[in-house]
Image: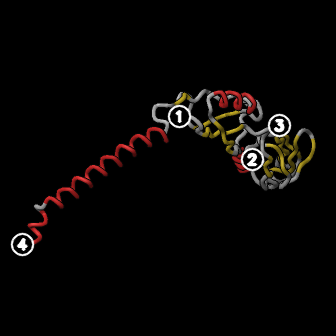
Amino acid sequence: MSLIKFLFSLKFFKQIIYIICITIVLIVISVISLSYITMHGESVKVPNLIGKTLDQVDVDLKSLDLSFVILDSARYNSSYKPLSVIDHQPIPGSKVKINRKIYLTINPSGYNEITIPKIIRTTIRQATQRLESSGFVIGEIEYIDDIGKDEIIEISHKGEMINEGDKLLKNSVIDLTLGNGKF
């Protein structure tokens, strides 16, 4: 009986009103402070940075109060200048908050060096597949007298003999010397 009396007492109703008032004040303070902290309504459009050098990117982003982080790039793209931007996140035209980081993918200064796979004494079909999948380009094919018909006897680059395991830049042209099956 005393619990029911307490629930309908003036003291209990005062406590409920205090709790409701404090909760409303805390919610209002939270909403106002979140708008200020998150810079609600303040955003800028990300410019198109693709093809620009790092110096140009720095100037463009500083004028918009944005910063950038360089992500490593393993793929060289010959249609862009070395050390220029080939991709970035967020994409151009996106709206972002001030002081946001833009993540850049940079074109390396050149192709990576790749190890020449083991192709000596393999067929032309196997060698072509291995070389092209590694990133090399097949150049001239020359035949010499050797018992292994259509087998790779020698490999060269720009007229110089090279060995399996040597390193060349990706997209290098490799010339092949094959056996013609005659001894």
Q: Residues within 10 Å of mark 2 (few under 14, many from 20)?
A: many
Q: Name the residue type under label 1.
A: Val
179 is higher (above) or lower (below) than 106: below
The nearer-to-camera label among 2 and 4 is 4
Residue at 12 percent of width and 70 percent of height: 3
Whole-percent x, y for residue 175 in the image: 84, 41
Element type where label 2 sits in the image: helix
Q: Residues within 10 Å of mark 1 (few under 14, many from 20)?
A: some
Whole-percent x, y for residue 33 in the image: 44, 42
Left or right position of 10 against 169: left
Q: Nearer the viewer, residue 73 or 29?
A: 29
Which quadrant of the structure image shows residue 111? Answer: top right
Res 1 label = 4
Left or right position of 101 against 72: left
Q: Mark 4 touching mark 3, by CB under 8 A?
A: no
Disc 4/disc 1 C-alpha distance (Å): 61 Å
Q: Which residue is mark 2?
A: 131
Res 140 label = 3
Outermost residue, bottom side: 1
Count of numbered tags: 4
Q: Which residue is mark 1?
A: 96
